[in-house]
Image: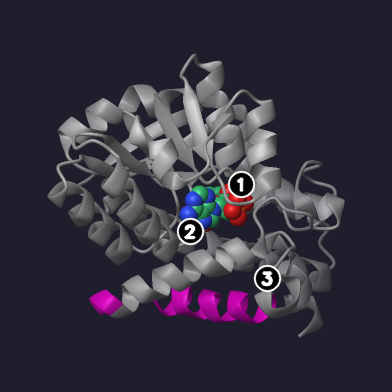
Amino acid sequence: MIAFLGLGNMGGPMAANLVKAGFTVTGYDPVPEAAARAASSGVQIADSVADAAADADVVITMLPNGSAVKDCYDQILAAAAPGTLLIDSSTISVEDVREANALAEDAGSPQIDAPVSGGVKGAVAATLAFMVGGTDAAVDLARPVLEPMAGKIVHCGGAGNGQAAKVCNNMVLATQQIAVGEAFLLAEQLGLSAQSLFDVITGATGNCWAVSANCPVPGPVPTSPANNDFRPGFATALMNKDLGLAMDAVAATGSQAPLGSHAAEIYAKFATEHADSDFSAVIEMLRRS
Ligand code: NAD
């Protein structure tokens, strides 16, 4: 039996895909609407974290932040049998996940970090990219549970390395989305059409997801959030959160990240008024400044 804790925008559809794959899934979420949505897709609902975890072979957490994960781990480890596999798919700091991993290992439970990329669309379509940190044995145990939710699973090394990969990827993505916005604005000023720039970049060395899938102007990619009033997509609030984690890691390691740091400043400012817009909407702030 799988316990699934955190049945929100991501956890709800991920748990539903495990049910579809034939697993018995018991979920818990303190928000009744989230629990009710999961129940309608076949997830059995428990009354507490401890109830959900008590008889589980595997416990998956998909929670908002590191303190929620560590709180939950205290409750899970008090209730679950030693040996229960713990998988954390939340996006949290490398430091927090390594603490959670140590808590689990001390209690005799294998634990992996398995954050995801692909957003709500990927969670619904079961095409998430999992970046996994943990021992070979724990990752092998987890694979059959991750596969029904995954497009791709990459084992990145020991505990915390999944989160390390996630913060590095999202720092690159943030800088690319800003750079692509700058290029489309410059093209406008130079009298170059958005479609021409798109056609050139997507066949040239500037190509990246931020333009080929998430083009920040309407037209070239009909499914990009720019065509839909910048409804996410990937909300600015989440990008701002991930850049905060990246900046914590930069500060903790003394690594140099001048572009990542500037992107973090830009998104922190943009998030004060546009937290709910897709992060590609940053082009509108550049246009106004
Ligand atoms: P969400 O806010 O929709 O869901 C989180 C859920 O956790 C909420 O329903 C909340 O009630 C529940 N929760 C809080 N404390 C709990 C507890 N103790 N026990 C059980 N449930 C609890 O957030 P989300 O969009 O589903 O994101 C979840 C995680 O995935 C975050 O760490 C986020 O950064 C990450 N993530 C999100 C996206 C995305 O596009 N939404 C993409 C990749 C990663």
- Judged left or right of residue 194, residue 178 is left
In the rendered structure, find residue 223 and report the number of the disc placed on it.
Answer: none
The count of marks equals: 3
Discs 1/2, front: 1
Question: Does the magenta segment cover residue 259?
Answer: yes
Discs 2/3, front: 2
Q: Is residue 208 visible?
A: no
Dot 2 corresponds to which residue? 170
Q: Quadrant of residue 222?
A: top right
Task: Report the front residue among 84 and 89.
Answer: 84
CA distance separating discs 1 and 2? 21 Å
- Nearer-N-terminus badge (1/2): 1
Q: How is the image coloured?
A: one colour
Q: Residue most toward the top?
A: 22
Dot 3 corresponds to which residue? 182
Task: Report the front residue among 30 and 64.
Answer: 30
Q: Main secondary structure of the magenta part?
A: helix
Residue stretch rendered in magenta on the structure: 252-270
Q: Give the image location of residue 112, x and y in percent.
A: 28, 43
Dot 1 corresponds to which residue? 8
Instruction: Check disc 3 and give the amino acid type.
Output: Glu
Q: Secondary structure at mark 3?
A: helix
- Residue at 39% over, 44% down: 50
Q: Is mark 1 within 8 Å of ligand 1?
A: yes
